[in-house]
Amino acid sequence: MPLALAAAVTAPEGGRIEFRLPAEEKAMLARAAALQNMDLTSFILGKMLPEARAVIENAERLALSERDSLRVLALLENPPEPNEKLRRASQVARNIT
């Protein structure tokens, strides 16, 4: 089994991430960074931050079908009358504030 080397990525604000990887993987990352004329930290952050943003955006986005979108719009334009449970919750909220 190859020896695992510790690698650290330091963000400009001083945040630090450390991880272990085999020597040949670290060498591959270093070579790729050099081919891009970048240091290892910039190379890793440049590749991973857009991916992290995409993962977060996909997790936070709600996709509705056309039918569901139309239903939401219809409910916004013509909301149903509040039921007893909603009236009680509203009263509780008013008493808290």
Image (spheres, helix red, strand yellow):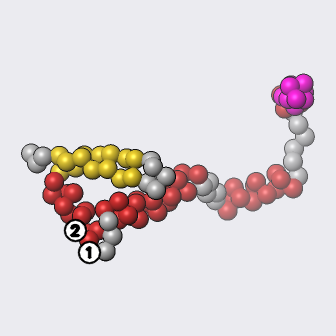
How many marks the image carries: the answer is: 2
Q: Residue 82: image x %, image y %?
A: 88, 37
- Quadrant where the N terminus sits is top left
Q: Is residue 89 magenta?
A: yes
Residue 19's spot in the image, x, y percent?
29, 46
Question: What is the CA distance from the residue labelled 2 to the residue labelled 1?
Answer: 6 Å
* Left or right of residue 27, residue 96 in this image: right
- Find the magenta span and give its range: 88-97
The foreground one among 10 and 61 is: 10
- Which residue is more in the foreground, 60 or 17? 17
Amino acid type indicated by mark 1:
Leu
Number of the label disc, if any, that sits on residue 31: 2
Which of the 4 image quarters holds residue 88? top right
Q: State whether the magenta stretch is mostly helix, strand or loop.
A: helix
Kindly check if marks 2 and 1 are in contact, taking CB atoms under 8 A apart as contact: yes
- Left or right, 36 with respect to 64, comes to left
Eyeballing the image, is 54 above or below 92? below
Measured as percent of width and height from the top left, residue 5 is found at: 19, 48
Q: Residues within 10 Å of mark 2 (few under 14, many from 20)?
A: some
* Residue 39, picture quadrant: bottom left
Residue furthest to the left in view is: 1
Identified at 20% across, 57% down, the residue is 25
Disc 1 target residue: 35
Q: Secondary structure at mark 1?
A: helix
Task: Look at label 2 and name its amino acid.
Answer: Arg
